[in-house]
Amino acid sequence: MVLLMHAIHKEWLQGEGLCVLHFFLKQLAILSPSSTEHVISQVFAALVPFLERETVSSSSYMNSKIVEILEELVVQNKDILKQHIREFPTVPNVPALSEVNKVIQEARGLMTLKDQLHGVVEGLNHENLNVRYMVASELSKLLNLKREEFMALFTKEGDLVMDVMSSLITSLLKGCAEESRTSVGQRLKLICADCLGSLGAIDPAKIKGFSSTRFKIACSDDDLIFELIHKHLARAFRAAPDTIIQDSAALAIQELLKVAGCEASLDENVLERTKGKQHLKVGKFSNRGMDDCSEMMLGRGQILWDRFSNYVKEIIAPCLTSRFQLPNVSDSAASGPIYRPSMSFRRWIYFWIKKLTAHATGSRSTIFNACRGIVRHDMQIAIYLLPYLVLNAVCDGTEEARSGITEEILSVLDAATSDSSTPAVHSTNFGQSEVCIQAVFTLLDNLGQWVDDVEQELTLSQPLQSSNSKKEANKLKDQSMALLKDSNQVLTQCKHVSELLGAIPKITLAKASFRCQAYARSLLYFESYVREKSGAFNPAAEKSGVFEDEDISFLMQVHSGLDEPDGLSGLASLRKSTSLQDHLLINKKAGNWAEVLNSCEQALQMESFSVQRQSDVLNCLLNMSHLRAMVTHVDGLVSRIPQYRKTWCTQGVQAAWRLGKWELMGEYLSGADEDGLLCSSSESNAFFDKDVAKILQAMMKKDQFSVAEKIALSKQALIAPLAAAGMDSYARAYPFVVKLHLLRELEDFNSLLNGDSFLGRRFRLDEPEFSRTLENWESRLKLTQPSLWAREPLLAFRRLVFSASGFGAQVGNCWIQYAKLCRSAGHYETAKRAILEAEVAGAPNVHIEKAKLMWSTRQADGAIAELQQSLLNMPVEVVGPAVISSITSLSVVPVNPPPLLSDTRCMNENLNVAKTLLLYSRWIHYTGQKQKGDVTNLYSRVKELQPKWEKGYFYMAKYYDEVLVDARKRQEDSNDQSVRSMSSKIGDVASKNVNSEEKWWTYLPEVLLCYAKGLHRGHNNLFQALPRLLTLWFDFGSINYRSNPQSSKDMKNVQAHVMRVMRGCLTGLPTYQWLTVLPQLVSRICHQNEEIVRLVKHIITSVLRQYPQQALWTMVAVTKSTVPSRRVAAAEIIQAARKGSSQGGSNSMFVQFATLVDHLIKLCFHPCQTKSRTINILTEFSALKRMMPVEIVMPTRESLTVNLPSYDVNLTESGTSDIFSYSDLPTISGIADEAEILSSLQRPKKIVLMGSDGTERPFLCKPKDDLRKDARMMEFNAMINRLLSKSPESRRRKLYIRTFAVVPLTEDCGMVEWVPHTRGLRHIIQDIYTSCGKFDRQKTNPQIKRIYDQSQGKMPEDEMLKTKILPMFPPAFHKWFLNTFSEPAMWFRARIAYAHTTAVWSMVGHIVGLGDRHGENILFDSTTGDCVHVDFSCLFDKGLDLDKPELVPFRLTQNMIDGLGITGYEGTYLKVCEITLAILRANKETLMNVLETFIHDPLVEWTKSHKSSGTEVQNPYAQRAINNIEARLQGVVVGVGAAPSLPLAVEGQARRLIAEAVSLKNLGKMYIWWMPWF
């Protein structure tokens, strides 16, 4: 195939090449039809370009031949085509190919855009370069043709489409790093960069990261051969661009198969097997005896051969009989290191591998020799083999070989650190040395991992139990002798490798990594260097670190490169003294440009000619958008320090193009292109801005060719750094993607100009082409990261476009958007500047942004006055006389208001007035400046102006709600008072006052109505409004029930009104909204008020009919309740739902469901034999096995969580099927034959359910455990995740809590979704201590128990902990991160994820009073580093009532702190605690509404005393818990060792809680097996 493709591309061989190819394809179809699928896309990719070029020179004979080949391929292979249709491009519309197109179209069928994208992702990962290029070109066309559809996809399906987008972006970044040096490879890079620009700079917070798997060095030779052939050589053989490379690959495969003993006879088996599958099946049993003999003969070769997939077997089968030979080369390796700084990476690695292969010893040398030829051509194979070669030399080679390797590695690293004085980012040579350094890093990682793996295996393989019988003991002794011999040999090898790793100084590695911008790696090495030298900051440990200032300065530079501002603040707090340089770094990273400017001014006083500081000043002015000042400053510098004119002009260009000063820009550009000195740190942004300015200049000169050329050059310059950063993560590549985004918009604008000059052409807003482009730009902007640096250049370019056509309002609007970004980032000075610019440009609505800025800077009066003034300036007939009189508090003679006009301009004006009015009303209500009547007037007018606006109703409801709460509190207090002070007169006066006021419940119908109307119009506030609405309704129902039967007529009227509103809700609100509050509804099915109960049952029934799958899982536990009245009520509801169920089939589903649940409950409580580890489901639960498959949704988190649809008011019931993350949720299609029994006390069972989508999902069936609390906790966590995703601070850090599905089946058993890849803290730490000899499973725990017993009463607990126990266990959790995440970027991400998730959990856990956080209830995910908590039975401060009360607010023991890095909890952890706490406190009401459902769900321990009663009862224990939570949300520290505090600020509360958690006094008083030392 390679030869044919090669021939077709040589002009003088084309005709013959095509004929041979045609013949080859015909024969292939006859001999091996299944192979055709592997060549179809290759043939297409090779031939289609000829047709697209269709030049005069290409003969018509050629074209017709190509068409003939393609037609045959497509028409004869329709079935194969259907399976692989995704890889196919849309063939160009050449008339000759109409037949081919028709067939492809039929096979493809109707594909949604999302399906097409899935196809593209597969195509971009194809092994053949031509196919990848073809698919990328197709994607590029698709993105241009369907821009609107793409944007619609994002707005409609937000999160669902992000999975595809994540894979697509990952594949495109991989395409940008294409290794091939051919012209197609270069074109592929460009086109991938192009596609990234067309997609736009999608916010990295939305893109899911992909975790790479850990590299593991294969132990046996056969494993190595298998991996080499399966993963590398077969690929190299298939994708070879020419015959030399293909032959080298074939030779390597041939030799390796020989080494493994694969005979040619194996090949027949392959043919037989594919031809005669049926024949084999029949003859299997009759030849039983013969089979047994042949099975004995199965050798090493057969075992290896069977491991290959059929696809690989087909590729490598010819190599079983091939006769390639490799000439022997004399060993000409010189002594001393090979590496020279000028060498290319290919040459260096080839020579080094050649040298290592020549010196290789043992059985592996034959494997290495076989690959001698291919390593010259294929870099991937070379890099893969390097660690094996080095290991071989280090473990089994001579001392000389070992020192040779150390020298080689050091020579590469020294070359990197020695020339660190000159930053060589722009030289191509540095690019080469960077790749060499990266290869050395990867090699060291692999060796380090090998040592860890070996050491761990050795510790864990030591015999554990002491055996009983003598015979066994002798047997064990022999075994352990053999083991000892082996392990001694392995230990020596380990020692050699460790010595090699130790011989390379950590600090050299750190500096070399920093030089390559591999900041995560630099941090990893430097931290371990600092740890050895000065320990780590850890107040809970025995000793705590004190660091040297220069170490911290280096760490700060690294953190600054990692873009981790939280870590910077932590480092700064650990310094003994802060330097100017640190101030600069911290403020630069945090974006506090005003502070940076101050620091620069200070520095310039000391050294007034510092070029670096002057450059920083210019950068500050640019970032603060003082553009005119910047220009003045540049002009001054050019005359004062002329030798750096090139630097000043380069930076001046940035201001000139943003200001639209074209002559000045031209002047600066010519200055920037002259020869001259460049300031070392002038940013890459300045160079990019220079490109942008040149493109704009070419547009002004109408030079189309030059525009295209400059855009292409600019892209070309971005590809190399983009590829390097993209290997690490999308977030690191993001700055380059933003630049591609801007270049794309420059191209759009250029095509709009259509050859006119940029200054001469004036657009109109109603030009269809222009307005379409603007809409597209607007949608693209919304998808970018909402940060200043990302959006500023895009907004600046838009301002230019608008001002060139004289659209003042649009220019102003860009400034307003910029001001918003500045305000949300806390840069109030810059925001003020932007608002002034917006006012000058004449932007509408600038008053709102101005007022919001004042409000943010605590100038409440000014903000309100600003809005008040603008309302008074608006037309009276729109604002309404009632409002004006409320504002001025003077009555205006009412003009008869004209009816609200409904043409679009007026609608816009109405919306603006409504927005201003709503903001004004909210602030007036917040500051309490007006009477109730006035505020009500204001809110009512908002409703009238915008009757379809959800926001207006929601805020009005909140206002009425507060009025109601306030009135209720006053009236209830006065009732208490009047009871107490019957005799005193003062009480009477007070109560008279209150009595004359309306009763609080008279406000209720209005509150409920406003909430309901808001919900009817949208669901942005669904999770706040609906739970609150239900709480109020149920509450009033209870009060109405308790009041005496002769109660006032008023109350009955209110009750009737409330019920009317609620019935309206039942019919008016979409069912999915009720589904979100189903648990709250279910918890109240025994409410005392019968009328309410009837309606609740109706609501639940309607949810069950619409979403039976999800609702049934929520209802299970109630149907099995031990409280008879609840059980009966649930049965009634299910009965009613079954009767009225819309689908006929779902009736059987209800029956199936009940049976399934009964089986699962039996399984939970199955009494197993004491020693057995598994249950055989086939025999013990055959009925369960027989009922599969069932039409019941798998109870996973994705299947049970509601995803809100993008809201459309006329959303009908039928349109709500897509509210779950996938429209076709997997159902349960089977259960695995065996269930595992876990060893913990209750012996839970781990079962595996098979899904209809082919995936297996494990679940834990837990007996004797009330999981209702856990289920509630998961709902609470889902709520927290929604709050975290709304706040910009937490969204930027991707904060979240890991949740999983919890399904209570009865009140004392249930199912929990298994969280994969997790392990408990205790087991992790125990393994680490065991491997370094600090823990012995038999002796250590009893020893600790003795220490505790002996010290009791003799010394304080904290003293005992500090002096006797902590010294036994130095903190070691950081080692888990090093061992688990071998690749530094992954290690850093995992550690950040650990810090984030642990901090969020600490705060949330403390707020809800979560206790019992011992080492088995806190798990860690070995793929992401996430902290996952399980087992929530000890909620609501139950830990305070234990025999040994839990005095710490959360677990922050010495090892938990150790995992956070050398700065401990300072920095990231503390910052995230503050952010989380601030969000929780800001959303107090919402959280309390969700927690109130806990009170009414009769949880087991809350209802021991009153099981029999048929209705719900108030619950003093729950009430105390809720009061504690409320206090914590106000900043009071309660429920810890210390006495309650006064309400603290967020920062104070976070610090105080951490201090309580690490206090040795508190830790010493904890229950011994909570293990405060772990």
Image (cartoon, helix red, strand yellow):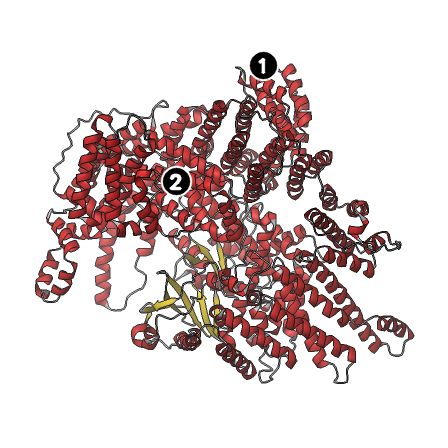
Query: Where residue 138 is drawn, which disc sits there?
Result: 2
Q: Could you tell me which secondary element the residue under label 2 belongs to?
A: helix
Q: Could you tell me which secondary element the residue under label 1 belongs to?
A: helix
Quadrant of residue 231 in the image?
top left
In x, y percent, where is residue 481? 23, 55
Inspect the image, locate mark 2, and give the three-letter code of the amino acid beneath it: Glu
In x, y percent, where is residue 719? 44, 32
Question: Nearer the observer, disc 2 or disc 1?
Answer: 2
Front-lying residue, 272 or 610: 272
Front-lying residue, 759 or 354: 759
Residue 209 is left or right of residue 1440, and the answer is left
Question: For mark 1, does the 10 Å Cα neighbourhood hold few (<14), some (14 to 19), or many (20 or more) residues?
Answer: some
Q: Is residue 688 visible?
A: yes
State which quarter of the image contains the N terminus: top left
Residue at point 70%, 39% (across, down): 828
Residue, disc 1: 643
